[in-house]
Image (tube, rainbow, N blue to C red):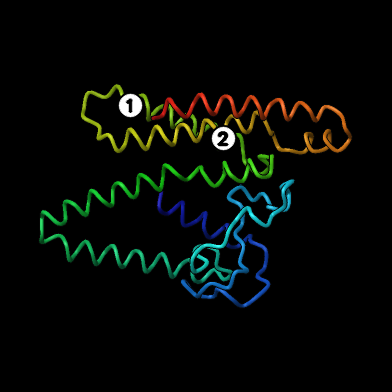
Amino acid sequence: MVAVQLVLLKIALDNRPPPSGKTGEAPFAGLDGRTRSVSFSMTSASNSPTGGGGLFANRPYNFWQWRSPKPYWQFLLYMFLTLLALQVLLSPFPDVYGAYSVLIGYVGLSVEATLPLPQIRANMRARSCRGFRVSVLASWLAGDAMKMFWFFTSTTEIPWAFKLCGLFQAVCDSILGIQYFVYGDGTSSARDTDSGGPGIMLKEKEAAFRSAAASILPNAR
């Protein structure tokens, strides 16, 4: 999985728009207030009816919004070396190492569980799921279903951290599914709205989406 993610990062960096400036050439290069991130689904913020200015706020030190590909690989190398050093330094102390291992596990599960959130926000702001493949959504939902079945039917003890993070991710993926049903790729909806035609159907679907999301979220608590 790590190897696949590295390949995906390389592809994403190779297919970004060319940089328009020389800032952000190193990790934590500073805050210049100008760098904008690329949508997780490659959906441009300019497609949003509210404009692209507020979709992706600048992050501290432009984290993961660097213009050059080099700082991404530098950051991953620094993180790997830091984790390796902590592994070596803390392993002789069982109590400390045990707490550290639990912390790393919770952080990793939390990061994985929150991965759909940027996509959900981008879809809501753009009122479109353009660029988001149905096959990806189907694989996520199928994976969630299998994980939930295993978490709650397994005869072995499954830590609640896995169950809670899995439930949260399943809820987020379900919201993505509802968004795809409501928005589609956004093309026909935008055309209908501009012509004064059946664009009202999109508003009705959005109302249904909000109602469905409200009914799903309490069940995850």
- Residue under pointer 1: 150
Residue kind at label 1, given as amino acid type:
Trp
Q: Nearer the viewer, residue 96 or 41?
A: 96
Relative to residue 37, is residue 155 drawn left or right?
Answer: left
Percent coordinates x, y for residue 130 in the rendering: 68, 42
**Front disc: 1 or 2:** 2
- Residue under pointer 2: 176
Residue kind at label 2, given as amino acid type:
Leu
Relative to residue 104, is residue 175 drawn left or right?
Answer: right
- Residue 100's disc number: none
Residue pictured at 68% horizontal, 26% vertical: 205
Percent coordinates x, y for residue 90 in the rendering: 16, 62
Q: Report crowding for label 2: few under 14, some 14 to 19, many 20 or more residues within 10 A (C-alpha).
A: many
* Image quadrant where residue 85 sits: bottom left
Relative to residue 133, is residue 151 drawn left or right?
Answer: left
* Image quadrant where residue 208 sits: top right
Relative to residue 210, is residue 86 drawn left or right?
Answer: left
Residue pictured at 33% horizontal, 26% vertical: 150
Whichever of labels 1 and 2 marks the residue nearer the N terminus, that label is 1
Q: Residue furthest bottom?
A: 22
Q: Secondary structure at mark 1?
A: helix
Residue pictured at 21% horizontal, 61% vertical: 87
